Image (cartoon, grey):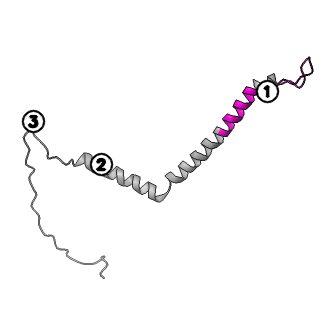
Amino acid sequence: MVLRSIRSLDADGDTVVPDIAVNVAVLLAVVDVAVLVYFIHHIAQSVQVGTLSARVWQELRDAVDVLHPDEPPTGLSGDVVAVPMRSAARMPARTTRGLLMT
């Protein structure tokens, strides 16, 4: 719309240029380049190994917190329910085939 209103010569011989519209367009172009540079920087940071491993570690901690909360489970009456412990048994290996022995 601004380009259509620019005329080389007016009836009086003056050049007509909408200054405010042109200045706003230049300002928006500068802001657009800055946002593009920020976006490229953000993408480059987010695919680094350190960032990905920190994100996976945090998701693992959140999942463990959801599945195994710190407070003990309670019954319907609000009493703490005793969780039965399973007995442990030794299971010796029959062979060492396939294992690395150092």
User: Height in image: 86 above or below 14?
Assistant: below
Query: 10 Å neighbourhood of mark 1: few (<14), some, or many (≥20)?
Result: few
Residue 23 image offset from top left, x and y in percent: 72, 31
**Amino acid under disc 1:** Leu
Q: Which mark is residue 3?
A: 1
- The residues tagged by marks 2 and 1 sit, at their Cα atoms, a distance apart of 57 Å
Q: Residue 21: where, in percent of width, then height?
A: 73, 27
Give the labeled residue for mark 2.
63
Image point 14% across, 47% down: which residue? 72
- Outermost residue on the bottom side: it is 102
Disc marking residue 76? 3
Which of marks 2 and 3 precedes in the sequence? 2
Q: Is residue 10 left or right of residue 57?
A: right
Residue 63 placement (x, y as % from top left): 30, 48
Q: Which residues are magenta?
A: 7-30
Q: Residue at 69% across / 30% down in the picture?
A: 24
Task: Between label 2 and label 1, give the one nearer the viewer.
Answer: 1
Camera-near label (3 vs 1) is: 1
